[in-house]
Image (cartoon, helix red, strand yellow):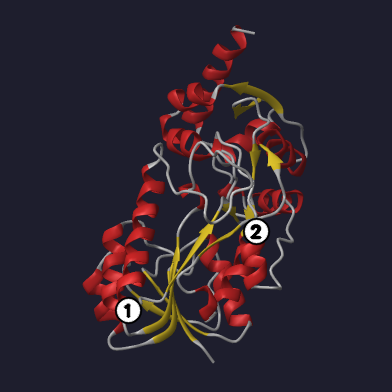
Amino acid sequence: MLTVLFIGGNGIISSACSRLAVERGFDLTLLNRGRDTSRPPIDGVETVIGDSTDAQGMRDALGTRTFDVVVNFRAFSPEQVKADVDLFRDRTGQYIFISSASAYQKPVTRFPIVESTPLRNPFWQYSRDKIACERVLMQAFDEHDFPVTIVRPSHTYDRTLVPLDGGWTVIERMRQGKPTLVHGDGTSLWTLTNHRDVARGLVGLLGLTRSIGDAIHITGDEILTWDMIANELAAAAGTTAHLVHAASTEVAQAFPEWADGIIGDKAHSLIFDNSKIKSLVPDFVASVPFSLGAREIVGWYDEDPSRRVVDRELDARIDAFVARVSERV
């Protein structure tokens, strides 16, 4: 039985991976801060309390323990992964770093995106930090045989995440018959991935030595437009989306909290070639269509009224922005 450490374990991606790893018989330990989350606890795991941003704290929490596989879902800076290289060198047979498909070159110059597509995102610091992390780890692999595998998911969601900027506020606007704001003309192509599908690919890589020294993205195969995403969510909410479009740059300027994600990722069409993960993990298949995922999202929020929180200030800002855009039509 492989011993596995997940740094994280209760997040969107990691919760599904944790459940599947337990189902498949891995001896799983989670290292996290032990805070309550919106997801139920995971049975069959050991939990160690520690902070992934505190290198000495992690050393103290783990002591002299070793693991066959370590997966870090919570590393976002090169300093963090440098500390991981120091901590886990000679203490694991495989270190899996969860990067991001947003690291791929923007604008995209060739489709489909493959793992050798250049890594360059001048628009989003989050993506540049992930790229820097990858470079540190690959240098450690080249110079010290550090056993790294890099995984790049793309816009992974679970039932707690509305994959539109504005979150649940947007769904409530749909139910009230208010306009739904979509960046661009709504026709750019996008890939959403259900967390259960990512888990199937990632858990298949645990202990797979053929993946060491390599990078693999794990994404869905369903190609959607942003209009289609909004319409699926509206249908799941039992209503119709009244779509209003505006240039991505204009939306980003009006809603700066969304700007990096829009300009650095969502404004660009993304189509992925998943041949590599399918060759490494033959049972990998992205089996959850977004039509099902949308119903799960709306159903989860509708189960508990306390989850259906509307940001009234954001709601008013969207109304004002849509009114300005509509005046030009």
The answer to whether one can see residue 65 in this image is yes
Q: Amino acid at mark 2?
A: Asn
Relative to 177, is 26 above or below? below
Residue drawn at 59 percent across, 53 percent down: 157
Q: How many numbered discs?
A: 2
Give SS at disc 1.
helix
Disc nearer the start of the sequence (1/2): 1
Q: Which residue is mark 1?
A: 88
Q: Which residue is mark 2?
A: 274
Outermost residue on the bottom side: it is 1
Nearer the camera: disc 1 or disc 2: 2
Left or right position of 299 against 152: right
Pointer 2 local density, CA inside 10 Å: few below 14, some 14–19, many at least 20: many
Residue density around tag 1, few if under 14, some if 14–19, many if 20 or more, within 10 Å: many
Q: Quadrant of residue 138?
A: bottom left
Horizontal and vertical percent position of residue 300 = 65, 54
The alpha-carbon separation of the residues under discs 1 and 2 comes to 29 Å
Q: Is residue 206 visible?
A: no
In the picture provided, is 200 more to the left or to the right than 311? right
Instruction: Name the foreground residue: 174 vs 277.
Output: 277
Residue 201 vs residue 118, the one in the foreground: 118
In the picture, the quarter occupied by the C terminus is top right
**Residue at left 35%, top 59%?**
135
Q: Position of residue 217 (x, y in %)?
A: 56, 59
